[in-house]
Image (cartoon, rainbow, N blue to C red):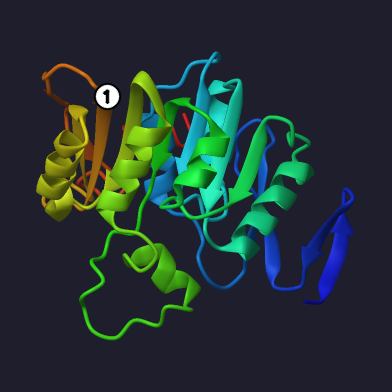
Amino acid sequence: MKVRKNFMNVNINIDESIDDLQLNGLRLIQKQQGFRFGVDAVLLSHFANVKKKHRVIDLCTGTGIVPFLVHGKYNPQEVIGLEIQDDMVEMANRSSKLNNIMDIVKFVHGDLKDKKILDTLGKFDVVTVNPPYKLNNAGIVNPDDKLAIARHEIMCTLEDVIIAGRKLLKDNGRMFIVHRPERLADIFGLMRKYKIEPKRVRMVQPNTKKAPNIVLVEGQRDGKPFLKWEDTLYVYDDKGNYSEEIDHIYGRM
C-alpha cells in the first residue's frame, strides 16, 4: 500500500481521506472508495444512553465511526470497537492515534462469535451495534467483498450479534441496535430468547410520506418487560430540507 503522506505522525494511504466529524475536533480516516459511514451510525450514537462512568463496546465497528461519535458526545471511561476485518481495525487504530485518544478509544481485531476473545474483553455497561442488515440468501455474494461483509450476514448473523451482546453486557446493561424495520420481529424474538428485554424503539422515516427505513432498538440484559415506543424521527421535512431534529443531532443548530 502506497503511503500518501504522514499527518501528525500517522500514515495516511493514498486511497484514504481524513474526514472532520464536526464534533470536538475529531477526525476519521476512511477509504475514498468503499464503505463510508452514513446516517445509521450518527443516529445510533445519538440514540445510545451513555454516561461518563461507562465502558462501551461497539460490535461490527468497521471504520470505528460509532466509538468516535460516542466518545465525542458522552466522554465515557472507555470505548472499544470489535471488528473482524483486520485492515479496518488497523485503519481505525490510526484514527485513534490521529485524535490522540488511543488510551480511551481502542479497536480489537476479532470475531464476535469467538467466546475466548469476548472473555478477554470483560463486561460492559453499553453495547452498540450497526450489524449487517441483509440476509445472506439473496443471490451470489462475494465473501471477500468489504461492502458485502458490511451489508450482508456473511461473517455473522443477527442471532450471533445478540448472543455476543448478552455475553458482553454487565447485569442490567443496555444494548443499542440500528437495523431495518422489516427485521424488527427478529430483533424482538432474539432479544427475548437471550434474555435481553426490548425497552425502547424508535422508527426513522425519510419524510412524513414515506415508510420507515431505519429502526433503533434498546434492550436491557435481564430487564423487566416494559416497552416504550418513541415518536418517529423524520430525516427531511415536507419541503425537502433536513428536519430540525436531524440538524440538532448533527450539531448544526
On screen, 152 above or below 109? below
On screen, 156 above or below 138? above
Amino acid bearing label 1? Gln
On screen, 140 above or below 130? below
Find disc 1 in the rendering and name its residue: 220
In the rendered image, residue 202, in percent from the top left (x then y), is placed at: 20, 34
Q: Total marks drawn?
A: 1
Front in this rendered view, residue 155 or 205: 155
Q: Is residue 53 left or right of residue 132?
A: right
Q: Quadrant of residue 204?
A: top left
Q: Residue at x 49, y 41 (%)?
A: 118
In the rendered image, residue 203, in percent from the top left (x then y), is placed at: 19, 40
* Residue 114 seen in render: yes
In the rendered image, residue 110, in percent from the top left (x then y), is placed at: 54, 54
Q: Residue at x 21, y 36 (%)?
A: 194
Front in this rendered view, residue 203 or 119: 119
Instruction: Identify the image quadrant of the N terminus.
Output: bottom right
